[in-house]
Amino acid sequence: MDHEMSIQKRDKIADVMRGAERMGCTSHPTFRAAFPQIEAIHVEVEYTRIGHVSAWPSGTVVYSSLDNLSRFLDCRNPVCYGGGVDLNDVIMWMVFDHKTEYHDDSRCRGYEGSPKGRTNYGPCNRRFKVSVTLTYKPEDSGDSGITTRGPASINH
C-alpha cells in the first residue's frame, strides 16, 4: 500500500485561513487588486526537509505573474497541520518599505499532528527558502492618482 495514500489530509495554512476569510478578515480578491503599484513579480519558494531522511517530497514552486499567485503556499508535508508560507505578508511589507528583493530561509510554522490537528506531535520538519523580486510601476503611471504605501491584504 502506498504510504501517502494511508495518511489523512491535514489542514494547511490556506485551509485554516479560509475560515478567517469567511469572517471578513480580508479585503482584496487578488494580488493585482491589493498591490496596484506592482508591475511585475517573481516568487520562488524552495521547500526542503529538516533533519532525518523522509519520504515526503522536496521541490521548488515558481510564480511569475500577479494573476496566478496564491496568498498561501501550503506545506507539502502530509502530516503537517497549519503549515505553509503566507506570501501576502512578505509582499505587503516589501511594498510598504518599497523593497525590490526579499530572501528568507525559515522553518515551517505548522506542526505535525493528528488528522484533526488536536494532537501535536512536534514542529513540522520542513523548511522554506523564499525569494521575491518586485518591479514597481512608475510613480506617474496614472492608474488612480493614489499611491498605496500602507499594508494591504488579499483573500486567496
Image (cartoon, rainbow, N blue to C red):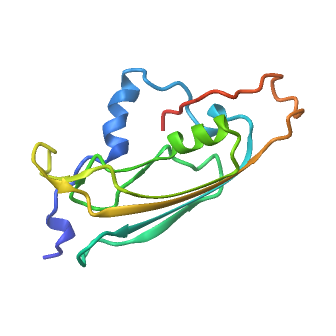
Specify whether 25 is left or right of 41: left
Q: Position of residue 44 (x, y in %)?
A: 56, 61
Identify whether 144 is placed above or below 7: above
Q: Position of residue 37 (x, y in %)?
A: 74, 36
Query: Residue at image x 21%, y 58%?
Result: 79
Specify whether 110 is left or right of 89: left
Number of labels in the image equals: 0
Identify whether 57 is placed above or below 92: below
Q: Where on the picture, by quarter, is residue 153?
A: top right
> Toward the viewer: 102 or 137?
102
Query: Residue at image x 63%, y 46%?
Result: 67
Identify whether 57 is placed above or below 9: below
Please identify the quadrant where the N terminus is shown.
bottom left
> Toward the viewer: 103 or 89?
103
Q: Where on the picture, by quarter, is residue 29?
A: top right
Specify whether 48 is left or right of 32: left
Query: Residue at image x 36%, y 28%?
Result: 20
Specify whether 16 is left or right of 131: left
Q: Position of residue 119 (x, y in %)?
A: 9, 47
Query: Residue at image x 48%, y 38%?
Result: 156
> Toward the viewer: 109 or 54?
109
Q: Position of residue 99 (x, y in %)?
A: 69, 46
Q: Where on the picture, by quarter, is residue 131?
A: bottom right
> Toward the viewer: 149 or 14?
149
